[in-house]
Image (cartoon, rainbow, N blue to C red):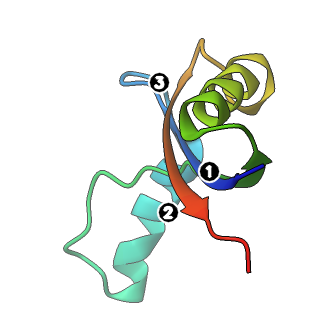
Amino acid sequence: MPSFEMHVEVTHLPGIADPAGATVERALPALGYTNVSQVHIGKTIRLVVDAADEDTARREVDEMCKRLLANPVIESYVITSTSLERA
């Protein structure tokens, strides 16, 4: 069965407070980075999924996101994938 490396990028929905991003944004000027704004912090999740095909793997990861990996009330997510060749 083929394996697929799946990457999930989870970010806050527009209008949802991002306290970690705000803290980093306030701290950067003290370090000399005065040209940075709109800092947002999210999370990246990497999984290897064994599935019959890429569409099946993507559907399974989408279900995982809806059930566990992301909070759909305050977060959005994007799934990307790469096929892994077996040696």
The residue drawn where x is 52% and y is 51% is 81
Can you identify the residue that label 3 sits on? 16
User: Separation of disc 2 and disc 1 at Cα?
Assistant: 28 Å
Distance between mark 1 and mark 3 Cα atoms = 26 Å
Q: Which one is in front, 7 or 41?
A: 7
Q: Nearer the viewer, mark 1 or mark 3?
A: 1
Mark with earlier residue (3, 2): 3
Cβ atoms under marks 3 and 2 closer than 8 Å: no
Looking at the image, residue 42 lies above or below residue 75: below
Q: Quadrant of the C terminus?
A: bottom right
Residue pointed to by mark 1: 6
Name the residue type under label 2.
Val
Q: Amino acid at mark 3?
A: Ile
- Report the residue that reaches farthest toward the top: 73
Neighbour class for label 2 at 10 Å: few (<14), some, many (≥20)?
some
Local SS, label 2: helix
* Residue drawn 30% across the image and 81% down it: 33
Query: Residue 19: percent from the left, percent from the top?
Result: 56, 42
The quadrant in which residue 13 appears is: top left
Tell me the CA gap for discs 3 and 2: 16 Å
Q: Position of residue 38 (x, y in %)?
A: 30, 51
Q: Which mark is residue 29?
A: none
Could you say whether the residue bearing mark 3 is in a helix, strand or loop? loop
| Labels 2 and 1: the sequence-earlier one | 1
Answer with mark 1 or mark 3, whichever residue precedes in sequence: 1
Q: Position of residue 23 (x, y in %)?
A: 53, 56
Determine whether label 1 and label 3 are within 8 Å by CB. no
Tag 2 residue: 24
Q: Nearer the viewer, residue 51 or 42?
A: 51
